[in-house]
Amino acid sequence: MKFLRQNFWIVVAIFTVLSAIFVVFTVKKKPPKNNISASELKEAKKQVNIRILRYEEDLFSLDMNNLQKGVAALSKKYPSFLVDPDIWQEPQFKAYLQDTVIIALQKTAEKAVKTNILLKELETAFGYYKVFYPNNIIPEIITILPGLDELVPTVYIYNDILFINVDMYLGADNPYYSAARIPMYIAERYDPVYLPVDIFKKAIVHKHLARVPHHTLLDAMITEGKKLYFTEMMLPALPERYIIGYSEEKYNWATQYLGNAWSYLIEKNELFGKGETLTRCYIEEAPFTKPFGNESPGRMGTFLGWKLIQSYMANHPNITLPELMQEIDYQKILSSSKFKPQGR
């Protein structure tokens, strides 16, 4: 009997392993949210050639005893508006290179923002981009370090060059952010994980987004929703909370009370309301969305606009991403989206 029991459990174990193997080889992988196949992506990635220049690293590798020679070399590598051959003589330039805070920020950025990791992430993201926009050129990327200057966008395009402000991606808990009195609800997105997101959400998207005056709150919501949907299509494997820039707790709240928030806007006739007050309340940066209480995340109008766009595209599978980005009939988007989230 003991022998039989032992053999029985051996058979069970073998069957379990074989079953697991069978599941692995028979269950099909779900296609990514953007419905682009692996073969399409692989072919598109052949056209992707990303170049990232670390301007701040080059600056801080200069020999302070021979700045003229070093600057002359950098002036051949970077645009003239970044490196003037005579800048080495400027007191402000030398002061910048010797500033202890700037030096500390640069060393931290060098550890936090890894070029090789970013390149790998962007190769896939721009591969998807090339499927949607095959004729568009991928911009050259230059990283900079302004020194926690909040007036400088974290990511932006100028003269067809994409600039990344690396001192805004050091990690949410970096002490320099609290020292600079940057609110946590903003600093929590100052993490390297948000870099690919911001590149598409804050910069690349503007090449393709139709410019429409925001007459109503709905206009602003749909515009912001388009930006997030565009970004989601380039980063389909990334969890949604990173696309919107919410913590897990905030994302869960937004998802849970989506229907309640939508019903509130309709009941209060605010969906078609006008004025900057509504935009500030529901779209702009804030620790929470005031009408929904302190537990809510900020920018709930943006979240609602994104979910509305997702619903619209799910109900219109023949509409392409470029067509969505150029659609300016927002009333049509609303009515045909069939967006009716249920409240709790």
Image (cartoon, rainbow, N blue to C red):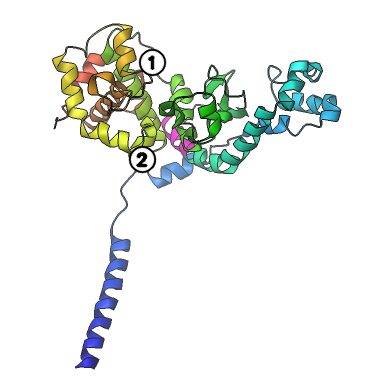
Give the structural element (helix, strand or loop) at label 2: loop
In screen coordinates, is 58 left or right of 279? right
- Quarter holding the N terminus is bottom left
Where residue 207 appears, x then y in whole percent? 46, 20
Q: Quadrant of residue 312?
A: top left
Report which residue position mark 2 lands on. Answer: 239
Instruction: Tell me: 57 left or right of 38.
Output: right
In the rendered image, the quadrant that contains the C terminus is top left
Q: Is residue 114 visible?
A: no
Q: Which mark is residue 210?
A: 1
Residue closest to the eye, 55 or 210? 55
Q: Which residues are magenta?
A: 125-136
Q: Determine the CA span between mark 2 and mark 1.
A: 26 Å
Identify the residue shown where x is 30% and y is 19%.
222
Residue 238 within the segment the image draws in magenta? no
Packing grade of label 1 (10 A; few <14, some 14-19, many >=20) is some
* Location of residue 159 (image quadrant): top right
Residue 130 shows which numbered tag?
none
Marks 2 & 1, CB-CB < 8 Å contact: no
On the image, the x and y values in percent for residue 197 come to: 44, 32
Element under disc 1: loop
Q: Mark 1 or mark 2, which is nearer the start of the sequence?
A: 1
| Left or right placement of residue 85 versus residue 15 in this view | right
Q: Tell me the kind of residue under disc 2.
A: Pro
In this view, the residue in front, 206 or 175, is 175
Please state the horizontal and vertical placement of residue 55, each as a whole percent of the image. Answer: 67, 29
Q: Looking at the picture, tell me which residue is in the foreground, 38 or 85.
A: 85
Look at 46% across and 24% down and name the residue there: 202
